[in-house]
Image (cartoon, rainbow, N blue to C red):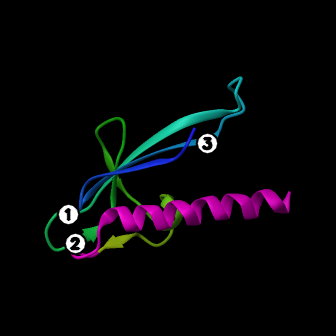
Amino acid sequence: MKTTITAKSESHVIISYDDEDHSTESGTKRVTREFTRPARGGGYVIERLRNSETTQVCDKLCHRGSTLYCGENTPLVNIIRREYQAMRREEKRIANIY
């Protein structure tokens, strides 16, 4: 399926994409992730997890590395789109090594 990035507001974004999952017949699984940042003043990007917990998000939408920061005047959707593309580029780079 196609990747969808939905901006619920300037500070709330939901992204859905297919990811590899060799345990399924299709070889992929649908992943949906939800991101926020403080509505006023900007701040660190937070991912809302399924169990109602949150975690800071880093480069390439990972949970390690440099924490993503989104300024007050920058739409969060721009940051998520940029980091999603970086994540996919990194996946392709690693796949080409093997």
Q: Is residue 72 left or right of residue 82?
A: left
- Disc 2 crowd, CA 10 A, few/some/many (<14, 14-19, 20+): some
- Residue identifier under label 1: 38
Reply yes or no: does residue 76 show up in magenta: yes
Q: What kind of secondary structure does the magenta stretch mostly adopt?
A: helix
Camera-side residue: 96 or 62? 96
Query: Quick check: marks 1 and 2 in contact, CB under 8 Å?
Result: yes
Residue drawn at x 39%, y 69% as measured from the top left: 68
Q: Is residue 3 visible?
A: yes
- Residue identifier under label 3: 19
- Disc 1 crowd, CA 10 A, few/some/many (<14, 14-19, 20+): some
Q: CA distance from mark 2 to mark 3?
A: 30 Å
The magenta segment: 71-98
Tell me: residue 51, above or below residue 16.
Answer: above
Q: Earlier in the sequence, mark 2 or mark 3?
A: 3
Check disc 3 and give the amino acid type: Asp
Q: CA distance from mark 1 to mark 3?
A: 28 Å
Camera-side residue: 45 or 15? 15
- Residue identifier under label 2: 42
Tell me: residue 14, above or below residue 26.
Answer: below
SS of the residue under disc 1: loop
Instruction: Residue 90 in the image: state x and y as whole percent.
Output: 66, 64
Reply yes or no: does residue 3 show up in magenta: no
Furthest residue to the top? 25
